[in-house]
């Protein structure tokens, strides 16, 4: 059993909730339905802002692919979530393992509201969803990216997910952002503005790469997101100014 989320190519399948395995023949159990409605609530939160990043990302998913959200299986410790290629059983192209109960305030991973940055259940789901987005788009690229001491991203897909989730958090009014992939520390002040982040040579290189590969979505985010922290907006302003200067020089 699974449910589809609105008109998006997204399905939620709670049948992997452990207790469900024993009663599968009797239809959906409370555990399954509770899981599915809990994920719907988090997706509703992600997409609640009209024209916000959550809506833009879901709207940019290829309509002939499916992202399946299934319960987190504990693989990777109690506090985690992950995205992967879907199995043939789910008939999708990407799978997100995520359980809202793990990440809600007061749950095992979030004992209080301020234990780390980017750990809200909507932020964790968006992070994994952004990995799945790249998989169904065919642009997923785990090129190594780790520069000690404070760019511990592991690979550029983590930069992608963390950067876009930071922009989402900025839309919600946040002024503190997640630093990198090793924990949930705060992004240092030297990079906490759109311009300073974009102008760092390491980040610039990958912002440019993402811009080329995801130009539709990122142009949309650069031109119409209300986020104050929006390095893609800064990137577009810079390249627009460069193009204008080049055109003027040719005249
Ligand atoms: Zn990740």
Image (cartoon, rainbow, N blue to C red):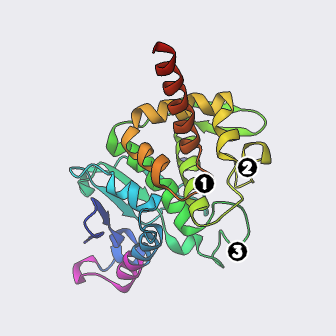
Name the residue carrying label 2.
Answer: 187
Q: Main secondary structure of the magenta part?
A: helix
- Please say if the residues under marks 1 and 2 sit with CB atoms less than 8 Å apart: yes
Q: Secondary structure at mark 3?
A: loop
**What stretch of residues is rendered in magenta?**
24-37
Q: Earlier in the sequence, mark 1 or mark 2?
A: 1
Residue furthest to the front in view is 251
Residue 84 seen in the current view:
no
| Residue at the image point whose x is 48% and y is 54% from the top | 128
- x 70%, y 60%: residue: 175
- Quarter of the C terminus within the rendering: top left
x and y percent of residue 210 in the render?
47, 35
Q: Is residue 193 left or right of residue 134?
A: right
Question: Where residue 46 sits: x, y (%)?
Answer: 47, 67
Q: Which residue is mark 3?
A: 113
| Residue at 39% over, 48% down | 133
* Residue placed most toward the observer, 145 or 25: 145
Provide the residue designation for mark 1: 166
């Amino acid at each position: 059993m699974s449910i589809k989320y609105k008109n998006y190519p997204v399905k939620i399948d709670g049948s992997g909730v452990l207790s469900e395995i024993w009663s599968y023949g009797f239809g959906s159990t409370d555990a399954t339905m509770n899981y599915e409605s809990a994920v719907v609530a988090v997706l509703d939160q992600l997409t609640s802002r009209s024209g916000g990043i959550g809506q833009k990302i879901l709207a940019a998913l290829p309509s002939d692919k499916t992202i399946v959200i299934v319960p987190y299986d504990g693989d990777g410790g109690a506090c985690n979530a992950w995205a992967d290629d879907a199995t043939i059983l789910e008939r999708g192209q990407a799978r997100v393992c995520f359980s809202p109960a793990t990440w809600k305030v007061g749950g095992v991973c979030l004992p209080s509201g301020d234990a780390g940055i980017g750990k809200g259940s909507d932020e964790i789901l968006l992070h994994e969803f952004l990995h799945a987005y790249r998989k169904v788009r065919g642009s997923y690229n785990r090129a190594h990216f780790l520069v000690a001491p404070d760019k511990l991203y592991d690979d550029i897909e983590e930069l992608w997910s963390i950067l876009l989730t930071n922009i989402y958090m900025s839309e919600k009014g946040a002024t503190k952002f997640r630093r990198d992939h090793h924990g949930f520390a705060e992004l240092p002040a030297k990079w906490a503005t759109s311009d300073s982040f974009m102008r760092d040579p390491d980040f610039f290189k990958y912002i440019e790469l993402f811009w080329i590969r995801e130009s539709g979505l990122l142009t949309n985010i650069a031109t119409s997101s209300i986020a104050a922290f929006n390095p893609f907006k800064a990137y577009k302003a810079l390249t627009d100014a460069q193009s204008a200067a080049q055109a003027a020089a040719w005249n």
